[in-house]
Amino acid sequence: MSLFHEAAIRDTVLFVNGVRAQTFAALDTYATRYEKKLRMVVFVDAKKNKLITSLNRQKTTKKLLVEVVDFDSPISIRKAIEKYRERLLAVTCQYENSIPFYEKIVPHVPYLDTPTQSSLDWSTDKIAMRQLLKTLDKSLIPKYTVVKDTTEASIVKIEKLVGYPVVVKPAGLAASLLVSVCYHREELEKTLQKTFKTIEKVYKKKLGRGTPKILVEQLMDGEMYSIDVYVNGRGNTYATPIVHVKTGRAIGFDDFFGYQRLTPTRLLPSHIDDANHAAFKAVKALGLRSTTAHVELMRTEKEWKIIELAPRMGGFRHEMYMLSYGINHILNDILIRVPQKPVIPKKVRGFTAVFNMYAKTEGKLKAITGIKKVKALASFHEINLLKSVGDELKFAKNGGGVVAEIMLFNKSRADLLADIRRMEKAFDIEVLSSRSKKPA
């Protein structure tokens, strides 16, 4: 592992297929804090024309270098790397669907601190992930099995090894895509048939990981939480504050999308310590190093269980941690790769909640109402509209995406909860549909 003082002339951070908007400010903070300016270079897959266009627009106003690379060609990657080799300080990937591209860069930067290709592969494959977690500590995960078809033998296998109720999920997709719950055989048969029918299309559209496979595991009862963990090249781990996650199922949807994320939580310190311990074990079971890992957990009556983890920052974590604690998550993601120790302030500044809004029925988007009322809330921080009138809306379990993202912040937990209630009453997504699919 290289030492930071040996990299005095290195001033370039390499990103894969894109950068989050807050990254520019994070690098400005680095320059102020460490008296060293860093520049950014982005390697973009040659087939991502829209992304390249977007980055080039950003390049005109920001200090951003964009290199178009054929990630299927080691020669193309090597040629691009050579331009920056002596000045590369760190390489990172901020988006999960670009991890396979990140893997292809790793062999070409052997003297930088990076995760191994194998660990990246294991931690983005839900099946390999569970196999390794089970090897370390089988109590970390629920019962599961893998199926490749909808035959009677596969159904019997699931009933014998897992039992009802079960969660059906693709092994290589994120964001709760195509995830469903089945309570009996009839539901399981219909769900498997539907999933196998659509999985190839969704994998292609959402850049699914590996060969499409179906994971079927025991449905766990409990509360969902997540933790982002920084792990350096020596395996030293640093936990960020725990976040409570409320899924769509908690508000009446027959869907597992992450509806609400809230921090700080009201968990006892001892419970948080136990959650951190489980997250650290999961990170090390997959051999992750020199990265940030996003770990999702379930708090059951008896213990913490690992739902899954990924070698990247959790969604909205930078904004949430900055608002509630003053933690610069994007900067820490770079520091852990330099390597430098991440800075994790403990003092609570306030309470942050983020919402992924889906329509209550599927169909074409007619209108979004209540935006002005949401913006008028004392806790309002940000809203992003991701769909336009006329767009086709689907539930996450059917391969659909978020309609809007809403972020609220307040120094008072009680005031935040009151504004959450007001937001949920005011904000509405109107859908045109002759065949409405209502939540269960």
Image: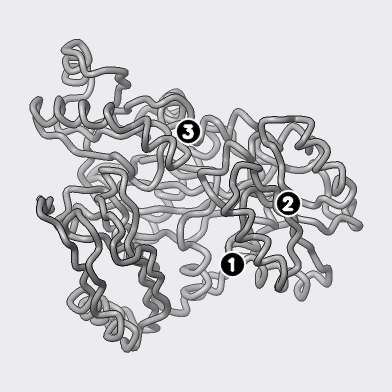
Element class at badge 3: loop
Q: What amino acid is at disc 1?
A: Ala
Which mark, residue 14?
A: 2
Mark 1 and mark 2: Cα distance apart in space: 15 Å
> Of helix, strand and loop, which one carries label 1?
loop
Label 1 vs 2, first from the N-terminus: 2
Q: What is the C-alpha distance between the residues marked 2 and 3?
A: 22 Å
Describe residue 266's horizontal placement relative to residue 234 as left or right. Answer: left
Residue of label 3 = 209
Count how many numbered circles sit on residues in the image: 3
* Whether residue 430 is situated above or below residue 197 in the rendered picture: below
SS at circle 2 = strand
**Residue shown at 67% from the left, 69% from the top:** 24
Q: Earlier in the sequence, mark 2 or mark 3?
A: 2
In the rendered image, residue 50, in percent from the top left (x then y), is placed at 57, 54
Residue beneath label 1, please?
21
Q: Position of residue 164 (x, y in %)?
A: 14, 29
Name the residue located 64 percent from the left edge and 31 percent from the top edge: 117
Amino acid tagged 3 = Arg
| Inter-mark Cα distance, 3 to 1 | 25 Å
Residue 11: % across, % down:
83, 59
The quarter of the picture where the N terminus appears is top right
The amino acid type of the residue labelled 2 equals Leu
